[in-house]
Amino acid sequence: MKIIIPIKQVPETKSVKMDEKTGTVIREGVAAIINPLDLYAIELAIQLKERYGGTATAISMGPPKASEALREAVAMGVDEGVLISDQSFAGSDTWSTAYILAKAVGKIGAFDLIICGERATDGDTGQVGPEIAAYLKLPIASYVNKFKEISNSSCLLHRMTEEGDQVLSVNLPALITVVKEVSEPRLPTFRGKLRAREVQIPVMTLKDLAIDSSMIGLKGSPTKVVKIFRPKVARECDKILARDEEQIEKASEKFLSILKSSGRGGTRPSTLGLG
């Protein structure tokens, strides 16, 4: 059994910054981690490999430093990592990214299952996994929260819906996107970290993939960010410091007047105390 796990290196949530001119995430000089939701996909892939045998390959599209995320996946138990990196890929939206990843999957060769995290924390769209399936013409199950078994070239699983769990039998090869409930990510082992330091991470570039250059990068992305702005939150309020009984009396009178003006006024409390 061969499993492919597309993962993404994302900025730490508190470090996310946007380029207001291009509408893209600024990644240079920012602390980066494996997309947290991809960790559940990695864990499920490792569990399936341990249960059924075979290999698990993590792939990631990004700048050279994205190889760090692939090495971490190897330290967790993935067999190998492949980096898809080329300056011409910069600025690709979800549709272009999925196109490039689908081409990379085709280059890697035959597989049984692609496992993706539900979404990435930087873009938060949840589109890349389903779009890869569309490019590769694969059956897809999204929001998978329980993987039951693989038998007779199909897999049995549960997916979350608004009405509850839906039980599906999906023919292989297929792509699934998973949510947190599907697994509990393990920590990298010391032996895994040693192996990750030594493993070779091959790099696929534009020249290695049969890619239509008009479909990648900012120019090839159908999604356009028109404007980025920071919303301003303004609240009008009266601030009263009630530090003695006289001030408490004034505060209570003010509070009651506000309630009455809004139509929610009631009887005045007979006693007040300092809290």
Image (cartoon, rainbow, N blue to C red):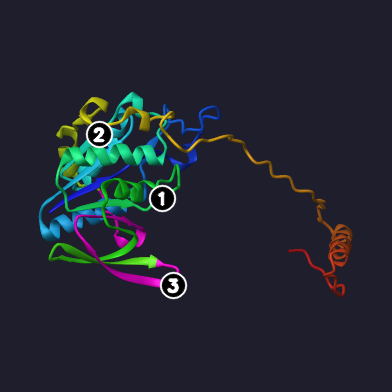
In front: mark 1 or mark 2? Answer: 1
Residue ID at (53%, 35%): 225
Q: Give the crowd class for mark 2: few <14, some 14-19, many >=20 residues within 10 Å.
A: many
Secondary element under disc 1, as helix, strand or loop, is: loop
Q: Amino acid at mark 3?
A: Glu
Q: Which mark is residue 163?
A: 3
Would you say residue 170 sits in the magenta stretch? yes
Task: Name the residue that disc number 1 marks.
Answer: 126
Residue 221 percent across, percent down from the top left: 43, 34
Q: Secondary structure at mark 2?
A: strand
Q: CA distance from mark 3 to mark 1?
A: 20 Å
Q: Amino acid at mark 1?
A: Gly
Q: Considering only vertical position in the picture, is 21 above or below 106?
A: above
What's the amino acid at mark 2?
Answer: Leu
For the residue labelled by badge 3, is the local secondary structure a helix, a strand or a loop? Answer: loop
Within-10-Å neighbours for mark 1: few <14, some 14–19, many 20+: some
Q: Residue at x 36, y 58 (%)?
A: 179
Tag count: 3
Out of 266 and 80, give the one closest to the viewer.
80
Residue 198 horizontal side relative to residue 7, left or right: left
